[in-house]
Image (cartoon, rainbow, N blue to C red):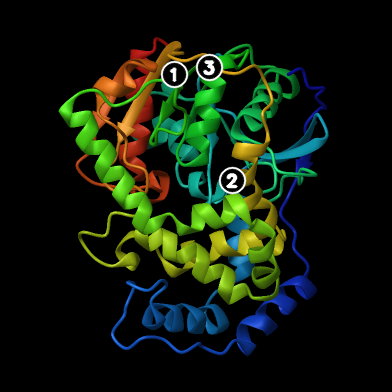
Amino acid sequence: MTLATGAPRPFKVAISQDAINAIMARVAAFRMPDMPEGGGWAYGAAPEFMEALIAYWRDGFDWWAAQDGLNRFPQFTARVGEIDIHFVHEKGSQPAPRALILSHGWPGSYFEFLHIVEKLAHPERFGGRAEDGFDVVVPSLPGYGFSGKPKKPISPRTIAAHFDALMTGSLGYARYLAQGGDWGSAVSGWLAYEGKGCAGAHLNMLGWRAPGVNPESDEEKAQAMQAAGLFEAEGAYFRLHSTKPSTLAYAMMDSPVGACAWIVEKFHGWSDLRNGGIEAAYTKDQLLTNVMIYLVSDTFATATWLYRGLFEDQSGAPVPPGARIEKPMGLARFPIDIMPMPPRSLVERMMNVVHWSDMSEGGHFAALERPDLLVADINAYARAAGY
C-alpha cells in the first residue's frame, strides 16, 4: 500500500471550556444503577470504586492540569493517505537519528507512553548514556484520540501501512524500531512483517500471528487452553466490538460515566493487582485522563471499529501459512494479560526472536504499570537487534 504523506503540522490539545462543561454536567447528573450485593468486580466495574471515582471526577479531577500534561512534549499532525495522524515527536539526545515508534491499543491511548518518552529519548537524565537515546514517536491510532477518523472500520495492517508512511515519508526516517502492546502489538507486528522502514519490533503482547502455526508441544497446548478459557470469561467486549459496535456507541455517546466504567473495568481486569487494588497500579488522575481523551475527542465509537476492521478490512495479499517475520524481534512476556503470550517455542516458529524476557510482575498496560521494566527491556532488545 503506497500512501501520500504530508509535512508535520504543530498541534496542541486545546479543549474548550464548553466541551468540558458538557461532559461534567452529564457526570454530575449520573445516577448509580442497582448492583448485586457484595459483587465487587465480579459483575463488572465495582460500584464502590466507581462511586469514589465519580466523586473525584466531579470534585477533584483537574482537566486543565491533565491537558497541560498531554502537551508537555512536542505534538504534530500529518496527513497520511486520507487520515490525519496525531503524534508526539520527541527528538532524543543521541547524535545520529535513531527512531522508535510506540503504538497503543484499546482501551488505552497515547497517554500510556508519555510516562516513558523522556526516559527513552534522554537516558542520560536517568543515569544512562545519551547515545542510547531514541527519537520517540507516539501516534494516536486512527479513530482514537486526536488522530482523524477513518470512514469505516480498518485493520491493524492498514494502520501499520499508515504508520510506516508517517515514519518514512512525513518524518523521513530510513529505519526505525516499533513497539506495542494490545492493538499496538498487532500494528508493530505488521510493521516488522512488511513495513518499508521498520528494522524490527518489540512486543509486550502477541498481536500478530502467522496462519497455520498451531500449538504442538504439551506446554503450548496447555497454554492455548488456558488462554481460551480466559478469553471465554473476559472476551464479551471483543465480541460486541467486532459484531455490533454501533449499538454500544449510542449508549456511550450519551454517558461519560458509562464509557468510563467500560474502560476502567479493563484496567482492573488486565493489570497485575497482586500487590493491591487498582489504585496500587494507577492513580485516579491517570484513569480519568485516559477516559477523558476518548470523551473530548468523541472517539469511543470509532475506537471500537478496529475490532470489526480486523475481519472486514482485507487489504494486502493473504499471508501464506507458516509465514515468519525475519526481522529481529523482542518480546516481553508480562504475567497478567487478557491474551497471555504463548511459550517461546511457538513464537519462534513465527518470528526471529533475538530477545525474550519473562517478567515476574506487570500486566497488559506495561508502560503505565511497570514503566522502568519496559524501558529497560526495549533498550536491551535494541542492543540485541544491533540497532
Identify the element where label 2 is drawn: helix
Inspect this view and state whether residue 71 appears: no
384 left or right, relative to 106: left
**Residue 76 in the image: above or below residue 66:** above
| Mark closer to the chain start, 1 or 2 | 1
Q: Check disc 1: other Cα within 10 Å, few if <14, some if 14-19, many if 20+.
A: some
| Mark closer to the chain start, 3 or 1 | 1
**Residue 307: which disc?**
2
Measured Cα–Cα span from mark 3 to mark 2: 20 Å
Q: Which residue is mark 3?
A: 193
Identify the element where label 1 is drawn: helix
Residue type, numbered disc 1 = Glu
Quadrant of the frame with the N terminus: top right
Q: Position of residue 21 (x, y in %)?
A: 73, 78
Q: Quadrant of residue 157?
A: top right
Q: Residue at x 63, y 35 (%)?
A: 155
**Residue 150 in the image: above or below residue 355:** below
CB atoms at circles 1 and 2 under 8 Å apart? no
Q: Which residue is mark 1?
A: 131
Q: Residue at x 45, y 34 (%)?
A: 207
Q: Check disc 2: other Cα within 10 Å, few if <14, some if 14-19, many if 20+.
A: many
| Mark closer to the chain start, 3 or 2 | 3
